[in-house]
Structures are given as C-alpha cells and as structure tokens.
Image (cartoon, rainbow, N blue to C red):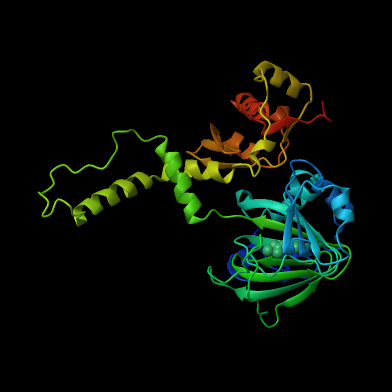
Amino acid sequence: MSGSDSPLTLLGGLSAAEFLRDHWQREPLLIRGAFPDFQCPLDPDELAGLACEEGIEARIVEERGRDGPWQVSHGPFDERTFAKLPERDWTLLVQAVDHYVPEVAELLDHFSFLPRWRLDDIMISYAPPGGSVGPHVDQYDVFLLQGSGRRRWQLGGKVPDDAPILAGIDLRILERFDVEPGHDWVLEPGDMLYLPPGWAHHGVSQSDDCLTLSVGFRAPSADEAITSFADYLGEQLPASQRYADPGMTPPVDPAELDDAAVARMRRLILDTLDDPAQLAQWFGRVMTQPKYVDQLVAAETPTEIADLVAELQAGAELLRSPGSRFAWRALDVDRATLFADGDGLDCSLELARALASDAPLDAELLDIPGAAEVLATLLDAGSLAWDDEEE
Ligand code: SIN
Ligand code: CO
C-alpha cells in the first residue's frame, strides 16, 4: 500500500497528506485526468433504467418545466416521462448508484484516504446540452467526476449561509452568482473537481452524453448532532438525574430565574453531555446508520451458529450488503466496538477491523474467537448476506 505522502494521480500529483492539508474542507481543486482513460461504468440509458426502479431515489430538474421554472419531479419514472422531455436544459439525478452498480461502488476504493464513515453516496447525473440544477451551494464535500461527455463548471466562491435563494421553487438556487476569476473550466471524462462545503457552483452540460458522478461526503450539523446525541443519552438516563438545588439561599424575588439557577441547569446539561465514551458509542452508531433504512432486510429466522460455521467451512462466503456501513473504535488493546448500520457490537479488535475492511468474509475469519456469533448477528440484521455465486 502506498503511504499518505506518495503522489496520487487521483489528486493531480498531490499526496493524500498534502490534499488534506491544503484542500479538504478549504479550497477547491481541479484535477485533469484524475482517472486516466476513464470509462464510465454505466451509460445514460442505464441511468434512466435505474430511475424507473421502485425504491431508487431519482429526480428530474427541468429549467423550463410545464409547471414553471426549475420544476423538480421525483421518481420512479417510466419511459413516457423520458419521451416527453425536451431536447435540452434538463437533468436526471440518481442517488446512491454505488448501492446498485458494483462497478460504481468499486470507485470508492480510490477514496480510502478519507474516513469511509464520512461517505454519503455516489450520485450520478445525466444532462443533455444546457442541463443544470442551477447555481447553488451544498453542505457537502464533493468530488465531481466527469463520467462521459463534457460539463462546464463555474465556481462562485464561498457564500454565507443566508445568501438569498430563488423563491417559489423546490430547489435552493442562488439568486446571485458571480464567477470567481479563473474558476471556469470544461471537464472531460476522467477529469475531477473537488469542492469543499459552502462553495457556490454551477455545472452546465455541454454535450448530449454528459454524465457526472458526485462522490459526496457528509458531516452532521451541530443541530442534528446535539439532538441525536441527546436522544441517545436520554434513553439511558435515570429519572432521578435532574435539576437539583439543595442548600440554595432564599430567592430575592421568587419570580426571578437567577444566575445560580441558570448555572445549576447548565452544569446538569454539560456534565451529562460530557461523556467521551458515550459520545463515541453514539457517534459510531449515527455515522453508520444506513442511508436508506428500508434497504436493510433483516432475516426472518435467526441463523444457527452451527449452520453458519458449516457453510463457511464448505467454502461459502459472506458479502457486506451494498449500502451497509461499518466502522470500529477500540475499547482497549484487544476489544472494540464494531459499528454496523447504526448498531454497536462488542467484539475483538481483530474481528472489528476485519469486518469493517474490504477483506473477504470466509472460513478464515472463524479463527478469531467470537467471529461466528458476530457474523450471525450481522447476517440476521441484513448487514451481511451470503454470496450466492459462491454457494
Ligand atoms: C449535477 O451533477 O448536475 C449536479 C451536481 C452538483 O452540483 O452537486
Ligand atoms: Co452541488
């Protein structure tokens, strides 16, 4: 494996360490030929096919829709939808294509210089000439990889949270978009543009085969984090842990909420929240929650450990379910919590690392104490599945 200081073609010759220091979350980076001779793993028709499937999140944005400007329609679509679209100025966007197309999921191997639990998904868009979703801002780090055709990208710099947006439409399009000098490029297949959160951008298709892959990385907002951590902790707190004021002095005015009362409440909240072990447990769970909870199909009957061991020993393999998320955190030198799809399992550090990696899940794993039980739990939860081809 190459170290974090070897130059990467994917990052335009920067090392992972240099990219993380100078660009990640800070500055955009245009990388010509990030994927040399890139062959897009799917074509516009295949993308449209996915957008017609039940359960796949897809949108069409029409700049001049029948119901008004920047009209957004939600899938699943059918062939008639596509037949009725104009020749230009629309976009089809399909989320989480990495869940459905293994060759798209394989692209993620190139992004192992980033924590895997930061990944949101790979969205793919198709647009005929002129198609765009308008100038906007995302709260995501995103690598915009040109799959086929050409797209012109213009960047408008960092914009404040309260930058005015167009009223009366279902998209958050900036009212004002000024291109930063020198931030205007046409991307060809294999070229990639990294964008930090908060940067205004506008991408317009320049060809009739324009496919753009957005490898998006998410970060919970303070609002989501505080609400979710408070909910997690709240489930474990005893009813007796509450605001308390023993030994208080008589109030000057019984109607006043005085400084001492506010300080007591502040202490209760801060002391309760300031629990690094609980915070890590919550963090692992929240960052591995699946993007689409209903894609996780739990087993109808619990797996018998003896059957699972026999299958593996007979040569069967288990696979991580597409879209399942794994991470781990050490508890001590040889124990860890394995986080899988929003749950936490206590197991050996060796097992947690193996399961959260890309390593094959076969009989060799059974050498690790406790492996069969954890595999059965993950199989029953739907995070793992038998590889049908191997059975
Ligand atoms: C697109 O692919 O058309 C839009 C991607 C983005 O701007 O985030
Ligand atoms: Co965007």
Q: Residue 73: x, y in percent? A: 74, 54
- On the rendered image, what quadrant is the C terminus found in? top right
Q: Nearer the viewer, residue 8 or 147?
A: 147
Which is more toward the observer, 41 or 300?
300
Front residue of 293/314: it is 293
Horizontal side of residue 7 vs 331, given as left or right: right
Q: Is residue 274 left or right of residue 190?
A: left
Point 29% across, 37% down: residue: 241
Quick check: 151 above or below 229?
below
Regarding ligand 2, which quadrant of the image does it lie in?
bottom right
**Residue 157 spot, x, y in % from top left:** 62, 75
- Where, by quadrant of the figure, is residue 253 drawn? bottom left
| Residue 313 coordinates in the image, percent (x, y) | 75, 22
Q: Position of residue 344 (x, y in %)?
A: 54, 35
Q: Is residue 126 above or below residue 229?
A: below
Q: Is residue 90 above or below residue 385?
A: below
- Residue 43 is at least partly visible in this image: no
- In the image, 226: left or right of 315? left
Q: Residue at x 74, y 41 (%)?
A: 55
